[in-house]
Image (cartoon, helix red, strand yellow):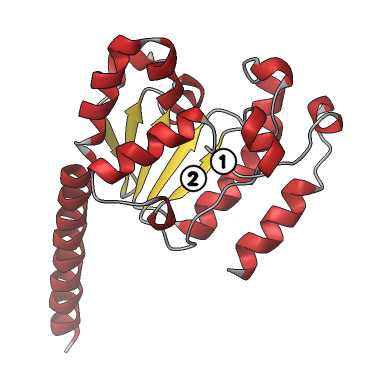
Amino acid sequence: MPALNELYQSIRSCRKCEISKARTNAVPGEGPGNAEIMFIGEAPGFHEDQKGRPFVGSAGQFLGQLLKSIDLSREQVYITNVIKTRPPGNRDPLPEEIVNCRPWLNHQLAIIKPKMIVTLGRFSMGLFMPGKTIGQVHGTAVKKDGVLYFAMYHPAAALHQGNLRGVIESDMLKIPGLLAGLKKENALIEAQKGREEEAQQLKLL
C-alpha cells in the first residue's frame, strides 16, 4: 500500500529521539493495509532492531503461536509497537519517546482503520486505557467510536513469568468472539441508520 510505504520511509528517517543514533533499523510495523486487527506492542528488541521487523524474537514466536490458536497468521493482522526504535538495553520507553512516536502510530491507525486494536503490555494499554493497570483490564475490551480495544499482557511477560502464559493464551481465545460481536453490532447500527435515512426521505416526499 503506497500510503504505508511512504509512512515507513518517514519513520526510518526520523531522528527526533536520541535513541535513533544507535539503532540498526527502525521498525515501523508490518501487515496488510486493510487488516481488521492491529496488535500494538511496546518497543523493538534486539532481533527486531537487527531485522527491521516487529516481533521476530522469542516473544514474536509466542505471538505466532497465539495467532495460530485462533486460526490467524501474521500475514492476516497488522503488528507494530508504541515506539519504532529499540531503547538501549531494552529499557522501558521514555515518556518523550512515546510522545515523539505517537503521530506515527496515529497515522498507521488512520490508514489501516482496524476494527479491533489489541494492546500488548502496559505501555500500549496506557495510550488507549489511561489510568488503568494491566492486571485490572487484561482480557477485557472497550468500544470507542466503533473500534474495539482489547488489553492483553505482552507476550514477553510469559517468557519471564511462566504463570502468565495460560492467562495470555486464555485472553487470546476471546478475540474471535469479540470481533464477531463487534461486526454484528456495527451491522445493526448501520441498518438502523439506513432505516432512519429512508424514513426521513419519505417524509420529504
State how many labels appear. 2
Q: Nearer the viewer, residue 101 or 90?
A: 90
Q: Under tag 1, what secondary structure?
A: loop
Q: Residue furthest bottom?
A: 205
Q: Which residue is mark 1?
A: 54
* Quarter of the figure with residue 132: top left
Q: Nearer the viewer, residue 190 or 183?
A: 183
Which disc, if any, is residue 92?
none
CB-based contact (under 8 Å), mark 1 and mark 2: yes
User: Which amino acid, mark 2?
Assistant: Ile
Which circle, 1 or 2, is nearer the viewer?
Answer: 1
Q: Position of residue 200 (x, y in %)?
A: 18, 75
User: Which amino acid, mark 1?
Assistant: Pro
Q: Residue 196, relative to residue 102: is it above or below?
A: below
Q: Position of residue 136 (x, y in %)?
A: 29, 14
Q: Position of residue 66 (x, y in %)?
A: 31, 37
Q: Residue 169, relative to residue 191: is it above or below?
A: above
Q: Nearer the viewer, residue 161 or 129?
A: 161
Q: Residue at x 55, y 52 (%)?
A: 30
Which of the marked residues, 1 or 2, is nearer the chain's N terminus? 1
Q: Which residue is mark 2?
A: 79
For the C terminus, give its image quadrant: bottom left
Q: Residue at x 25, y 20 (%)?
A: 167
For the N terminus, give its image quadrant: bottom right
Count neighbours of disc 1 (C-alpha within 10 A) and say few if under 14, some if 14 to 19, many if 20 or more. Answer: many
Q: Is residue 94 visible?
A: no
Q: Under tag 2, what secondary structure?
A: strand
